[in-house]
Structure formats: C-alpha cells, structure tokens
Image: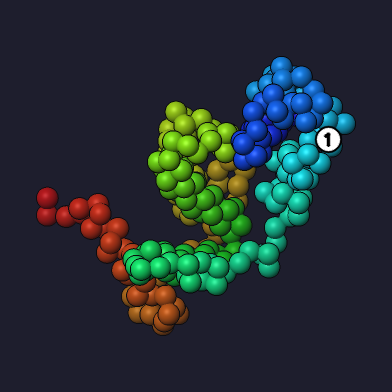
Amino acid sequence: MNDSFPRIITLLRNERKLTQKEAADALDISQALLSHYERGARECGLDFLIRIADFYDVSCDYLLGRTSERNGARLTVSDIPEPEDAMDNQYKGSTLPILHKKLIANSLNILFDLLQKTNCTDLTNQMALYQMVSVYKMFRLLYQANHENPASFFSVSPLCFQGYSDASLAVLEANISALSSGSAVGGMKPLKDAEPLRVSFESLNRDYPLFASSLMSLVRSAENAMNFDEKK
C-alpha cells in the first residue's frame, strides 16, 4: 500500500467517532486486523480497499493519498475558489484578519507574477513549496492548540513536525538561492535571465498599482517583527 493509507483510514474513523471495534465490526474484520492496517503493519487487499472506500464514501484514490478530493477528483485551477469570494464575508466583528490576509495575498500576487515572468519552472515550484510548508506550519500550530483534535489528521507526528518543517524550509531556501543565482541543483534547471526580476519602488508602483502598497506594508511589518536595526 503506501504511507497515506493508514493515516487516512484512521482519520476517517475518528471523524465518524467510531472505536476501532465498531469500525472493524462494520467492515466485517477483526479489530486486531484493522489495528494492523491503521498502524501500517500490514497491507490490505484490493477487496478490502474497495469495501472501506464504500464504507466511508470516499474514492480509492483518496484512501491512497493520490488526491485530496474525497470523491477522487483532481483539482484544476478553475476548481480552486478565489479567497476573497470564499471567506471575506465570514469575518465578523473585526477587520484585522481581512487586513492581514489581503496584505499577504496582494504581496503573493506580485511575487508569483514576477516568477511567471522568469519562465523558470523549477524556481517557481520551489518557491511555491516554500510557501506551502510555511502555511502548513501555521495550520499545525493552530491545530495543536485544541487537544481534542486527532493527531491522525497528519502523517508527521506532533513531536517531529516543527523540526521536519524547519529542515524542509532550509532545504527549499538553499535550492531557491542556488536556482535564482543561476546554479543548477538537484537536477533542477536554474534561472537563466534575472532581468525580469529587476525591481524598484517606481517599477512596483507602475506594474502593480493595486498591490504595491501591500507589499511595502508587508516588508515594513516583517522588518519590525525582526526588530531590524542596522545601527546596532
């Protein structure tokens, strides 16, 4: 099977608030065997894979970690909702979450547009992964605040996730630094022409009149958080 299967079937059982015995009885197997499957100690056969997919009303691809969509669909760009349409009207009583989200989203619009202009696929992918791991860390820190949340939601244990994610960020940062400097690394193709990345206050305001102020504000906020002072 694969590493995703034990984690996902455990998560699905916990979502249904079923004990291992209750789920095993419903699936017509022993609790011991289900325990083996959930721990990854044994691999199930195709018949059980189909049976448990039907039981939890998900696709086999979802159980195997091949898609994040429970019905087995693969996400396309058109499937992803615009964040402004999906969430802004849900914030009640405070504009602070919306303010922070828009500063970050507007800044990312600039960054990914600049990346698109470089036409460097590997650099773009590494930058995207860097952002994803950063958001992953944010989500896990919030998730662990409520001790009732099942640890089985993730495949990386609570004891390891901070170290692993920090290590991943360090590797991605090293790859980004190398690729953006024109050096190949790990079989990836580097940036060939840095001219599209020539940036100034004037060019940002000219090319991104709607977003430039957000990026400037983000830069100031980030440096304030660092307590950055060249005079020290």
Residue type beneath disc 1:
Arg
Image point (72%, 20%), residue name: 31
Rendering coords of residue 89 (x, y %): 48, 71
Q: Is residue 215 left or right of residue 184?
A: left
Kindly indicate the quadrant of the structure image that contains residue 124.
Answer: bottom right
Report the residue that reaches farthest toward the right. Answer: 47
Residue pictured at 65% horizontal, 23% vertical? 39
Quadrant location, the N terminus? top right
Q: Residue at x 72, y 30 (%)?
A: 23
Q: Residue 49 or 200: which is nearer the viewer?
A: 49
Q: Position of residue 205 (x, y in %)?
A: 38, 80
Compared across the picture, whether 176 is left or right of 38 comes to left
Camera-side residue: 93 or 203?
93
Where's residue 228, x and y in %?
21, 54
Q: Which residue is mark 1?
A: 51
Q: Secondary structure at mark 1?
A: helix
Q: Residue at x 72, y 23 (%)?
A: 34
Q: In this rendering, does residue 195 appear at all? A: no
